[in-house]
Amino acid sequence: MKKIVIFATLLFATLSAGAQEKPWSLQDCIEYALAHNLKVQQSALTVQQREIDLSTARANILPGVSASASENLSFGRGLTADNTYANTNTTNTGFSLGADMTLFRGLRNKNNIELSKLNLKVASEDLETVRDDIRVAVAQAYVQILYKLELLDVALRQVEIDSMQVVRLSEMRDNGKASAADVAQQQATLAQSRLTAVQADHSLQLAELDLVQLLEIPSPDGFSIEVPVFLEPELPWGTPDEIFDEAVNCKPAIQAQETRVDYAERNIALAKGGYLPTLSLSGGLGTNYYSNSGSTSAKFLDQLANNFSQYVGLSLSIPIFSRMSNRNQVRSAKISYQSQQLQLDQTKKQLYKEIQQTWYNAIAAYRKYESSREAERAAEESFLLVQAKYENGKASITEFNESKNQYLKAVSDLAQARCEALYQNGLIDFYRGNPIELY
């Protein structure tokens, strides 16, 4: 009896270790994961990079301005103004300010801006796709913990029942109404039940660790989840086709592929811009100062004023033959467009396949839940009858244990079926664009 109390105390301490902090609800876990998961953070950085790319593309339509200054010194023999050679030192100082601007470039600047916008949109939709994947993964890990909690509860109930039977048989043995073999057999059963409870507790800890790692929490110490008030699972409403029609309009994975098709189409227009001419405008200011050690030079400021000059110019470049480069770029862009259309179709088919599987899984899970509920009720009634017969000496300990094991297995099967049905229904709602909920 003392060993039983010690075991129960240790097991209770293990279960209570996670109760040091407020239990996490499913939404708490999802929100924390979205804020801390590394994959989400990496995708968010990609969005920021695409924003910078868009800013760069927009800035390319602005004029470029640059300034320069130079200072050149020459030593040794050189030709003088008298057409003779002499050892002289010369100094040449120059200043310039220039600007250039592309007036027309085959609409490539405009198309590059549109492509950058589409790239940013794709990155944002990819980010939301990653967030959706995290939501599903967190919900799945959460359901696993709920199921493991149910299994641990069943295991502890089994330990409790077996412990009571050990005490009862020990008293009967002392009164000469049971044999030592009966007590030993029940003690072996209790030992097996304790082992099952320990394994169930370990399995629960691993399930909690999986969720904690998904949340990027350093340690599972003090972590526990909130057990929701479950409603009875229901049959999913709607058909796979109806669910798919809703999912196509809201799932970011589909929207990202549609945007990639738009990107590929715009890229064709960009490639066709290679056939068009480029017109550029440029202008600038400049001046310089020159001195020669062998002659008298004008003053620095006077030379800068006298040598001041301005210029403005237009440059037109017309492509005539580019070694088939422009033609092949257009052809490649068209092939990429067709490839993206096929990828969009493939993504839609994959989504429809997932919805079909989820829908049929939800139907099967509900039917399994209904059957498990009936099996659990029947097993409970059978166990109560065998227990009453056993307590009145009309059933053996073997019959009692068999009935008990059947009942506890039915309870375990019912817990699994309920969790699975609620999870599959939650997935169907998620495909419709709603948050994942298990109740």
Image (cartoon, rainbow, N blue to C red):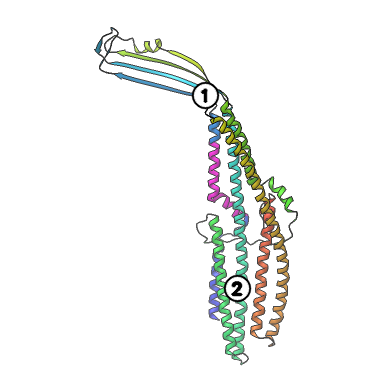
- Identified at 55% across, 55% down, the residue is 214
Element marked by disc 2? helix
Image quadrant where one finds the C terminus: bottom right
Res. 341 in view? yes
Which secondary structure is most common in the magenta stretch?
A: helix
Q: Quadrant of residue 308?
A: top left
Q: Report the magenta residues as a range.
A: 27-52
Element marked by disc 1? loop
Q: Is residue 241 above or below residue 71?
A: below
Q: Which residue is mark 1?
A: 63
Q: Determine whether, in the image, residue 401 is placed left or right of residue 39.
A: right
Q: Determine whether, in the image, residue 61 is placed left or right of residue 309.
A: right
Which sits in the foreground, 219 or 22?
Answer: 219
Badge 2, how many Cα within 10 Å: few under 14, some, many 20+? many
- Identified at 52% across, 56% down, the residue is 217
Please check the rendered image and state whether residue 37 is part of the magenta-colored stretch, yes or no.
yes
Q: CA distance from mark 2 to mark 1?
A: 77 Å
Please check the rendered image and state whether residue 301 is part of the magenta-colored stretch, yes or no.
no
Q: Which residue is mark 2?
A: 156
Which sits in the foreground, 158 or 291?
Answer: 291
Residue type indicated by callout 2: Leu
Q: Of the residues under marks 2 and 1, which one precedes in the sequence?
A: 1
Residue type indicated by callout 1: Pro
Percent position of residue 368, x then y: 70, 66
Q: Are marks 2 and 1 in contact (CB under 8 Å)?
A: no
Badge 1, how many Cα within 10 Å: few under 14, some, many 20+? few
